[in-house]
Image: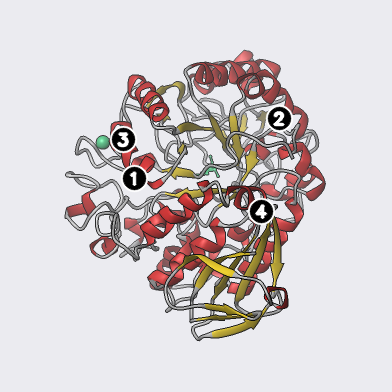
Amino acid sequence: MKKQWWHGKTAYQIYPKSFYDSNGDGIGDIPGIISKLDELQELGIEILWLSPVYCSPMADQGYDISDYYNIDPRFGTLEDMDRLIAEGKKRGISIVMDLVVNHCSDEHEWFKKACEDPYGPYGQFFHILPWHEGEKLPNNWRSYFGGSVWDKLPGHDDLVYLHLFHKKQPDLNWENPALREEIYKMINWWLDRGLAGFRIDAIINIKKTTPLTIDYPADRADGLCSPGRMLQDAVGVVDLLNEMADRTFRKHQAFTIAELFNWRKEDLASYIGDEGCFSSIFDFAETVINASPNGWYDQKPVEPEQYKQTVFDVQKSVGDVGYMANIIENHDESRGVSRYIPEGERSTEAKKMLGGLSFMLRGLPFLYQGQELGMENCAFPSIEAIDDVSSRDEYQRCLKVGLNEEEALKVVSHYSRDNGRTPFQWNDEKNGGFTTGTPWLMVNPQYKEINAASQIGKEGSIYEFYKSMIALRRDDRYEDTIVYGVTEPVLEDQKDIMAYFRRGEKQDILVIGNFRDEAAEVEIPELKGKTCQVLLNNGGTCMAVDGKVKLEALQGVVFEVK
Ligand code: GLC
Ligand code: CA
């Protein structure tokens, strides 16, 4: 694998709507982000990805774009965006935007023109097929947000259009070269403005099976099938991606990170190898542990053993082929500490341990806003307090299979994407210091205890722990091992102990965490006769003597081994 400028950095995702509101309208905005850049720099962040800030009707919180060339007034102006890029540059922070091109908004002018004249050029920008009342729809795919992927084309009783996501997110037709040209033009326009690159949304979906009229075996009683099945059969996405990369990213040496579920090992090099079409992709394997085709109500909690094995499997599969990005959460997930740490064990120490186990893996650590504070899932008081489209669909699903409202709310509260979207908790003042107005989504009541002001500069805080991990990653003495060292799991058969070496030229680094709520002693024979120096510790006393490592309950430690 060739070394790249971004490998040694630490990245951070901002969900703009919930980060910091500068003008009291209850919605986070770009000036708000700019005002916090110093703090992000202080933490050690060098790559900043913003979830979409383009013009949008917000049916899916900005992932439904009505104008790719402008900023939604709720978030600010184009000048604000330019200023953010420039201010980022001054602080060594590269700004990355979201690139949402599998679909646009039904309020985008392309779709409006397609509705006006479905047989004209813009009709070809979408997937529109004939259909008559009473007939079977063109196929039986189920939208990711529930219901059929087909809806009537507004103004036309005899036509339907395809949307894999919300009905306000019509899929763009990537088979049409004219559409592709428009997309490339737009990408280059942004890169020319000084943007460092893009996080690329839902991109695997751009290639569908053809013809579109093929049904798949139903995976639920509704007779429909998730598009995930169709994606297994779709061929040729890499050709489309390479064309896009050639025409845009490669010319600009842009940093690109794709949202790509279900990659196959044999395809990994074409995605993130040295000649791959992206710089990196996220490791999402942990986010789908125990996922059920039936929905959230049928999902079991994640066991630490499952987490550990999944992480290790991915590290082994990726090897030296490319450089993945490691996360514990994002805006589509519930909070990592609430998901991967068993209930009753979510202490400050446990949160640091989980953070450390993920952060020290080979790959780009990609933090999500609030992770550095140990923000947890939110206790939503009612379904009305939840905004997210997919959560509302899952709630209905729970009711349909017979759960009562209270049970349904409990399920949805555990998995809702809104857990990651509640406003950032800046301090213990009103609304957690996020806004002086009324926040667009409720603030997690935990803000009194969990907030930035109470952690920044406070010894022993989760924030300071993250800060020291980032500093360690940039420390000349360890950087090469932490950034490029091979990951080698050890003690794999020790239940609830997660441990791995990072093998480097200068040293080995041992990362070890104890998910048990009792002390543990483990033996690693190769440590005999070597010195183990503690580089990071989440608290408590730990010992590595004569090949034996003693850990307290929920203790996580990083050792340098020489
Ligand atoms: C991605 C985004 C998610 C969005 C979807 C449709 O999965 O991360 O938030 O709903 O794509 O754009
Ligand atoms: Ca605002």
**Element type where label 4 sits in the image:** loop
Left or right position of 163 against 72: right
Q: Position of residue 67 (x, y in %)?
A: 45, 22
Label 3 near ligand 2 (CB < 8 Å): yes
The answer to which of marks 3 and 1 sits earlier in the sequence is 1
Label 1 near ligand 2 (CB < 8 Å): no
Q: Rounded to the nearest whole Å, what is the CA distance between mark 2 and mark 3?
A: 31 Å
Q: How many marks?
A: 4
Near mark 3 (Cα within 10 A), the count class, few <14, some 14-19 or many ≥20, is many
Q: Position of residue 482 (x, y in %)?
A: 60, 52
Q: Which residue is mark 1?
A: 18
**Element type where label 1 sits in the image:** helix
The answer to which of marks 2 and 3 sits earlier in the sequence is 3
Near mark 1 (Cα within 10 A), the count class, few <14, some 14-19 or many ≥20, is many
The answer to which of marks 2 and 1 sits earlier in the sequence is 1
Q: Do residues under tags 2 and 3 come within 8 Å of each other at their CB atoms? A: no
Q: Do residues under tags 2 and 1 come within 8 Å of each other at their CB atoms? A: no
Which label was assigned to residue 29? 3
Which label was assigned to residue 241? 2
